[in-house]
Image (cartoon, rainbow, N blue to C red):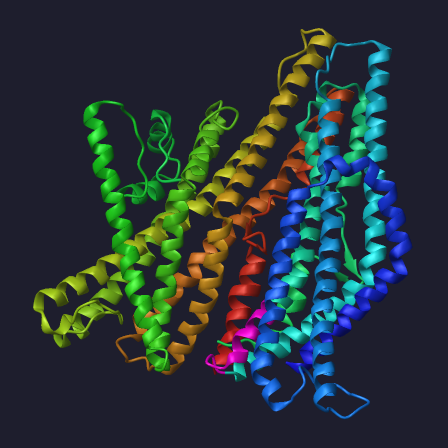
Amino acid sequence: MLQDRNKTLYVCFVKTLGLTVNIGITQNQFARITSNIIKYLEAKKLFRLLLAFLIVTESAVMATVVVSIFRDTPNREMYYDTYLPFDSSNIGYWSSYVFQITAQVFGSFVNVAHDTLISGMILKICAQLSILEHRLDLVCKDVDPHDQFTKAKKEKLNKITECIKHHLQILKLADRTNKVFSIVMLYQFSISTIVICITIYTLSQVKISDPEFFAMADYFMFMTVQIFGVCIASTECNIKSVSIATAVYQSNWYNLDIDAQKSLLLIMTRSSKPLKFNAAYFIEVSLNSYNQVLFLQSKPYLVPELIYYRPLILKYIINNIMLLHWSFGILQCLGLWQVVNSNSIEYTWKIFFYFMYTNFMIIFIYSCVLFELIALIASFDNPELFINNLIILLTMVGVCGKIANVIVKRKEIDQLIEILGSYPCCYQNEKEKVIEKNFDKTIKSRTIAYLIMTESAVVMVVSVSILCDTPNRALPFDIWLPYNYKTSNIGYWIAYSHQIFAHIFGALVNVAYDTMIPGFMLKICAQLSILEHRVGLLNKNDNLSKSLDAKKQKEINEISKCVQHHLKIFQLAEITNKVFSTVTFLQFSISSIVICVTVYRLSQITIDNPQFVPTVIYFTCMLTQVFITCFASTECTFKSGDVAMAVYQSDWYILSLGTQKSLLVIMMQSQKELKFNAGYFIDVSLNSYNQLMIKLSYSFYNVLQ
């Protein structure tokens, strides 16, 4: 702990020195930009960032100071080891002690000021990028495609020129920010990595009852947040810089003249190179490097709105368009999904009873998880019992998160359903209907296969429990109950039935939710295939008898429809990410732990043990649970890049020059792959499945060994 404090003060010294050297540069930079962007600064966001980091930092300092006062001062010991040029007499001791405490407090304020200064500057760049998006959108508004006046064209070109100059200033600002703070960021990354490793190791050696444990835990949280704030701001700026091309693509660019479209194309081309910040041109400052450098390097030290209702169209879409029919059907049976299709008094009573049924199911499952959690805490001293309880409990915690997500995010899920069932996403001809049906068959087959696998595991566990537990009046899983179930026959069977049915319902929730996410991803793949088909039809229309102007107008109309469809697909992907990202991250985390613990448990039991086969099936289910989502996400990523290939494979060379340029813009936008993430932190793909689920679980297993 003493070494950690010394390293922290060293970082404060480096930051202070860096600010002193660069103070002239920073002040001049502020003077040039403040007068132009002061009204656009996200003051509230920056204030919240500063306040949150200030609270975390000062709470860590106060915790260590309080512990030191009670532990060190009675023994005349210093806050941390230091050299003094005099003997530690009474006055000398208190002078040195106060000096150390004050230096530590001042150093923490330097950390707060410097670390939020970097994040603040990056967020200001994000604000400028948002302003640029707004200005680009205004350029393309109120454009008459038939306007032939030179003055109007020149005015539009002037506005685009101003946007280009603004974009160049943003790039210069990012480059300047990188030069000012790059070196200090390398110091911070290097020292934070060492400190986090040492702190985790020290925490593993300190008992929870030790007063220093909580101070060190608070200090550890401060060290992780210190880098995380800068990394998340940098990642936000990185994503925002690429969204300039999306903003151009979402505008009415197809109504502009060729010269204006060329200028916008240059902006899109430059925006395809995202803004990146680095630590001494050596480490990229992002959430990915935060994960790779800080946590994977310290891995060797790790120890183990209520229901929202929509009109009749939603039920029609679900039942008649086969939109994830199995997933939503299971949720309806479990009381977690209802569609209103009537306003009559009779149906109002049905709504009321279904609402009561929903609350009963939530209480039924959540109460079982709560009782098992209490039992888990009580079994902390028994490692074998603790591991057995942990495997099942973590799975049920994931079920609770999925139930909450379906209920809270009902409005967004309804929005996904409506978009898929409305123009331009609904099929327009028999060919598109066949494309959609093929993907529906894939979704159905995968759902049924996963349902069979999951329920077979549940049936196996229940069968073993009936044969092994009921004769001895034991429960399937360790649980705390407010009464003694062993003394009452009725009480035992109530507790036994509660556990069995809660886990059966939980398995069904897993099936419905885990197939819903890849189901929506495959629906997006279907939309991309339909878009490819529509792009291929651009030159198939019979326009030979039409005039040249009529042909061009027809091409513009068809291109605009394809662009609108493409934008809807991006909207679908964005909403899907927003709805399921957090729970996917929870699932990744839980599955990683459960897989490694399950493998460890399998290594401790023999093949002839009755628990071996159910554990193997359960292990297979946990692997499949995340795999089907990662596989669907990877399919969607590859499919999003096929749109550009579909454009190239069409007869684009016989189209007009303006249409060719519009197709080129679509091809450029298609190079931006659709990606889904878990908590905006982990890419959901087969690569991350291999890296995190398999390799990380194997590492944890070695630690347990």
Return the residue found at the far front: 91
575 vs 436, nearest the viewer: 575
Q: In x, y percent, where is residue 362?
A: 29, 50
441 vs 120, nearest the viewer: 120
> Against 378, is 538 above or below?
above
> Against 61, is 245 above or below?
above
Does any portion of residue 114 appear in the rendered image? yes
Return the residue found at the far left: 489
Magenta residue span: 207-221
User: In the drawing, does residue 416 fall left or right of residue 238?
Assistant: left
Q: In x, y percent, where is residue 494?
A: 15, 62
> Against 71, is 628 above or below?
above
608 vs 163, nearest the viewer: 163
User: In the drawing, does residue 342 fall left or right of residue 305?
Assistant: left
Q: Residue at x 85, y 50 (%)?
A: 176
Q: Residue at x 51, y 49 (%)?
A: 581
Q: How many marks?
A: 0
> Against 427, is 701 above or below?
below
Query: Where on the picture, by quarter, is residue 162?
Result: top right
314 vs 217, nearest the viewer: 217
Query: Where on the picture, by quarter, is residue 158?
Result: top right
Q: Is residue 632 magenta?
A: no
User: In the drawing, does residue 655 fall left or right of residue 417?
Assistant: right
Q: Main secondary structure of the magenta part?
A: helix
Does any portion of residue 334 appear in the rendered image? no
Q: In x, y percent, where is residue 392?
A: 34, 66
Q: Where the N terminus falls, by quadrant?
A: bottom right
Q: In x, y percent, where is residue 513?
A: 39, 49
